[in-house]
Image: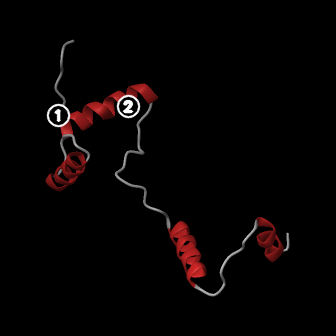
Amino acid sequence: MTMSSVTVRVDSETKAQASAIAEELGTDLSAATRMFYKQMIREQGIPVNLRLRDIPNTETVKAITEGRDMLSSDQGGHATADELFDSLGI
């Protein structure tokens, strides 16, 4: 298979940040670019969901905090699903 070169122009900070992420994932920018192209071909679109970790949104963080607060308070919980439904009036 004949190989071709691709030149991408980005600012130095963008390149450094992307390179650090690629290295953390165990690869380099060239391999990451090849993976990106292959995924574009496979999905017939531009993939946008590649990340190191999922960051919960504000609503999710609030729900997690409320749940932890409830567990650590005297509110306790419910021993059965029926108790939960009763407390909710269902």
Give the residue drawn at x 56%, y 82%.
72
The C terminus: image quadrant: bottom right
54 to the left or right of 71: left
Question: Quick one: 73 or 6, which is closer to the camera?
Answer: 73
**Residue 37 falls in image quadrant:** top left
Residue 54 point in image, percent of width and height: 43, 56
N-term mark: 1 or 2:
1
Category of crowding for the residue at label 2, using alpha-carbon neighbours closer than 10 angstroms: few (below 14), some (14–19), many (at least 20): some
Distance between the alpha carbons at the discs numbered 1 and 2: 19 Å
> Residue 5, image x and y in percent?
16, 26
Residue identified by numbered label 1: 7
Q: Which mark is residue 78?
A: none
Mark 1 touches mark 2? (CB < 8 Å): no
Question: Label 2 sits on what residue type?
Answer: Gln
Height in image: 84 above or below 5?
below
Q: Which mark is residue 39?
A: 2
Where's residue 33, x and y in %?
25, 35
Q: Residue at x 45, y 29 (%)?
A: 43
Q: Residue furthest top?
A: 1
Dot 2: what SS? Answer: helix
Residue 63 vs residue 26: left or right? right
